[in-house]
Amino acid sequence: MTPPFEELLSACGPEVVELGPAADAAALRARARALGWRFVELDGNAMKDKPALMEEFAKKLSLPDYFGRNWDALGDCLSDPEVFGGETGCLLALSGPAPAELETLRSVLVDCARFWREQSPPKAFKAVLLP
């Protein structure tokens, strides 16, 4: 069962959520933007292996040139206020097939969400997996 938007986008909601086939990326984008959040849609078709996954994140999030394209570097960049920007939250939507190394990616995203939740002021960081 897909949680309602308010639960999904709440500070205490889950950091990474798998949504069912009825999920609507456009509705998620509109709701996230209405809350003043950054919305980034990542293409699972482009993330067939780890290098391609890192490239998709680098491209879609405009990560800095020094991004090392490894898990630690991804976590560092996603936890960097210069990269994150001035938004009150960030919603990453991964659409299409599951990306490479999904469990490692999920762990990095959860760690980043916890990091941002502990900042002052806290910021929301969520990821949704769309079919």
Image: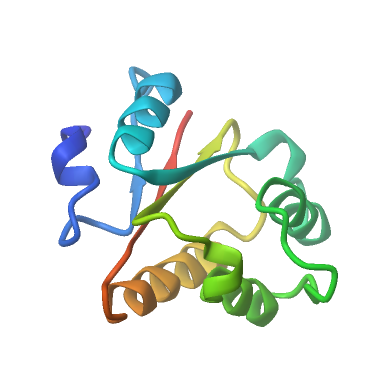
Q: Position of residue 97 (x, y in %)?
A: 60, 35
Position above or below: 4 against 15: above
Quadrant in which residue 53 is drawn:
bottom right
In this view of the protein, which residue sits in the foreground, 1 or 77? Answer: 77
Q: Position of residue 101 (x, y in %)?
A: 63, 60
Residue 58, located in which quarter of the rendered image? bottom right
Compared to 11, does 68 lie above or below?
A: below
Q: Position of residue 77 (x, y in %)?
A: 62, 73
Question: From what the image shows, is residue 131 above or below residue 75?
Answer: above
Q: 115 or 123, which lies in front?
A: 123
Residue 3 appears in the figure: no
Q: Relative to 76, does residue 49 appear above or below in the rendering? A: above
Q: Is residue 50 left or right of residue 125?
A: right
Question: What residue appears at the point 33 percent right and 75 percent down from the top-left corner?
Answer: 114
Number of labels in the image equals 0
- How are the colours assigned in the image? rainbow
Foreground residue among 75 and 98: 75
Residue at 35%, 44% (x, y): give it.
Answer: 36
Residue drawn at point x = 31 percent, y = 33 percent: 34
The answer, for residue 9, to whether it is visible in the render is yes
Task: Decide which of 19, 8 is in the foreground and name it.
Answer: 8
Q: Residue furthest front?
A: 86
Q: Which residue appears at 66% of the width and 36% of the height?
A: 43
Quarter of the image for the N terminus: give it: top left
